[in-house]
Image (cartoon, grey):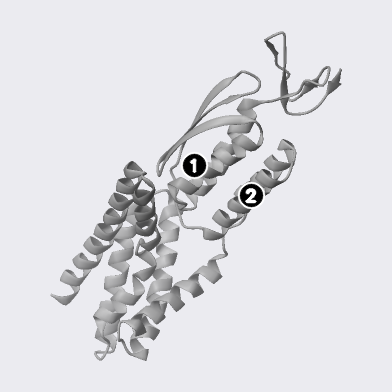
Amino acid sequence: MEAVYGFHLIVDLEVIKHFGEVIRIGGLIFMDTDRVLRLALLAGEILMQSGSEIYRAEDTARIISKSYGVNAECFFMPTGIFISGYGEDKKAISLMKRITNRTVDLHRIEMINSFSRKINKESISIEEAERELHRISEYPYRNLSSMLIAAAFTASVYSLLFKGTIIDALIAAPISAVIYLANSGISKIGFFQFFSLFVSGVIAGALAIFAKEVYPLVNIDKVIAGSIMILVPGIAITSAIKDALKGDLVSSVARIGEALLVVVAVGVGLGLMIIIGLH
């Protein structure tokens, strides 16, 4: 008898569990269904938290499960994921994970895609797969300075795109950086997303009005339009359309509803500040 990590053995239709071990007797080895599904669940969780489309996350979870001999059915939504599977160890397992934090991280999505393709094409141990997936989950998000620079650059470019002047672009850039900083800080404190978006709209309106008072030639509409572009849920709307085309109507409606609430939250904060500031 030889012990190998991560499997369950079935002998005479009886499951012999060894927590943290795998038993090999007479060459019969069976993959631990629970362990495989938890691996697929973590991959799906990372994808949904990173703003992935529903079909991509579901396909990834199925590919990972199938690669280790587990037949899985997946049902993913923006706020929760469900996986059920039946493996060679004769165990039927169902797992669920609530998704509370969602952002946009295309790099992490690509890392998970590469990970699932690697598992599908190569024979790697489940221990190695778990280490790789945990490495991806702990991969650091982009540092604050680079995100502030990106926010400022985005605002200046869009101000010019909306036919603003160089002055408008230069003013929109720092406003956008302040908005990103405030939105990120409020989210870390633990307030719900739409409150941080409302505050971001207030900040955009207040700083644009202040700039108009200091320099009357500023086009306040071009400054505001450029500075709030980092808040526009463009990827969420695109993902909603893709989900609808793939037949995931529940998720599509949920994403569109979330995008509309983002627009409303920013618009209410911005409109309130403009009404107060200009009158």
Q: Label 1 to label 2, Cα distance in Å?
A: 14 Å
Residue 250 locus on image (x, y percent) = 32, 42
Q: Which mark is residue 178?
A: none
Q: Local crowd at mark 2 within 10 Å, few (<14), some, or many (≥20)?
A: few
* Residue 108 in view here: yes
Q: Position of residue 248 (x, y in %)?
A: 37, 44
| Quadrant of the image occupied by residue 39 | top right
What quarter of the picture does the C terminus occupy?
A: bottom left
Q: Compared with residue 30, is residue 260 higher up or lower down, i.e. above or below?
A: below
Tell me what residue is drawn at x 42 percent, y 48 percent.
190
The image's mark for residue 117 is 2
Residue 249 figure quarter: top left
Tell me which amino acid carries mark 1.
Answer: Glu
Residue behind mark 1? 58
Rendered position, 275 above or below 171? above
Q: Position of residue 46 (x, y in %)?
A: 54, 47
Element under disc 2:
helix
- For image coordinates 31% across by 71% down, the residue present is 204
279 relative position to 164: left or right: left
Q: Are marks 1 and 2 in contact (CB under 8 Å)?
A: no
Task: Decide: is 173 above or below 72.
Answer: below
Residue 192 in view: no
